[in-house]
Image (spheres, grey):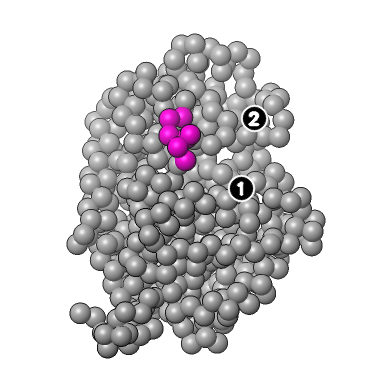
Amino acid sequence: MSQKNDQVLHVVFIPYLTPSHMIPLVDTSRLFASHGVKVSIITTLYNALLFESTIDHDIGLGHKIFVHKLKFPSDEVGLPEGIENFSVTTSQEMAIGVFMGIALLQKPMESLIFELRPHCIVSDMFFPWTVDVAEQLKIPRLTFYPTNVMYHCVEHCLKLYTPHEKVSSDSESFKVPGLPDEIEMKRSQLPEDVKNNPEGPYWELVKRIKESEPRSYGMIHDTIYDLEPSYVELYRKIKGKKPWLIGPLFHFSKRNNSRSSPDQERHSCLSWLDSQESNSVVYICFGSMGRFSDPQLTEIALALEASNSAFLWVVRKGDNTHESWLPIGFEEKMFANKKGLIVRGWVPQLKILNHPATGAFMTHCGWNSTLESLTAGVPMLTWPLFAEQFYNEKLVEVLGCGVRVGAEVWHISFDITDTIVKKEKIEASVKMLMNASRESENIRNRAKDVEAMINMAVEKGGSSYNHLTALIQEIKSHAFGISEE
């Protein structure tokens, strides 16, 4: 038995090629390595560059992490070299190319996994085929979801009870039955696969993901038990599987101060925030995939000026520098009056959210951003766009940590053009949260309570810490027959 205890557990991690999935799964792999597990990450050359510095940091600490880089099939899918991640695509056609390229990676990934002979596979939800490889190797496959569990519960109840089919229009509200809380939604806020039976390669993949779940050993989620305990219990009943909740995963990078490179340590926007009063700035960012039409961007700019709140606004860097959506003189006037700063490109989001001047976060409700805001104790102005983001908005609502901006329509990432949230709605939501009132004070206090709860979960003896150590022990037991001590 002592000889078995000396064996090193080897786990393969396969992250999907988009930041909201890649970053938390890479952080998961680093957490495993920090607990003595040998880690192999399978990705492509250009995607490896996105987290190379953090892996080098961990290797320097003596952690056993190996990155295996496969060639992305750019020629086969008609993409320029280096376009290997959804975040760098600028059109629907390019995104389809990345999607098809990822599908072509299956065979070389399979060959590499058989060559590596790991004790376990942890793969992103978008790689359902890994369950077949795991069965052939007689090892467990764990599905990684960069999500909370409430989203899965809400979607399950929507499909089970179909309340959206009992309303007369897309804009009519309905309650979702079978949930611990009263959740109200509109048909326009639901993904296509809930409302219809859409066809095409992406929706076929979604079906395969659902079919692979019962054959997976279990699920890993980037969430916290204490954040949604009643939904965790419902999730267990729905899935018939034990979920391991080990979030917030970015907390590991935050503690190790290893997600930013040295030359990014002091971004200029942080110096601008230093000049602002405490809790006075609205931070605005819609993630790497959030794209708005010019008219919508103009509405946001006008609303921010009318709200009289200071703001730090991150906009996606486009291919051309002509920005006709900006009102003439707007950017210069806001900057001169120390009222607003527009940043194009990357910003250190964790540092911004933890800066004393940041008083609110206008967000697309991507789960990574939502969790980062909750962990920093910053209340949110919620503006969901697509994927599971409208469900995430509902969790923020249940937690009492935000104010809705008023988005009502679910979109595909490259098609956020046909509906506009007007200036008046945006302005009203900003004023509701940023102006002093009993309601805004209650939201801020609740956000601080949630922050304290999350930070306790990652400490030794906390729920996320216990889930992680129990998971590693269970995989060891499966691999080596070691019983829990």
Tell me how far mark 2 sits from mark 1, CA to CA. Answer: 23 Å
- What amino acid type is highlighted by mark number 2? Pro
Residue 108 appears in the figure: yes
Q: Which residue occupies the foreground of this view, 128 or 42?
A: 42
Q: Position of residue 207 (x, y in %)?
A: 59, 72
Q: Which residue occupies the foreground of this view, 458 or 380?
A: 458
The question of residue 86 being in magenta is answered with no
Of the 4 image quadrants, the one containing the C terminus is bottom left
Residue at 60% x, 36% y is 316
- What amino acid type is highlighted by mark number 1? Ser
Helix, strand or loop at mark 2: helix
Pointer 2 residue: 295
Q: Is residue 481 left or right of residue 98?
A: left
**In terms of image quadrants, where is residue 18?**
bottom right
Q: Position of residue 376 (x, y in %)?
A: 32, 41
Residue at 30% x, 24% y is 278
Tag of residue 87 = 1
The question of residue 265 being in magenta is answered with yes
Does residue 179 lie above or below 348 as drawn? below
Q: Is residue 322 left or right of residue 186?
A: right
Helix, strand or loop at mark 1: helix
Numbered range of the magenta stretch: 261-267
Q: Which residue occupies the foreground of this view, 318 or 333?
A: 318
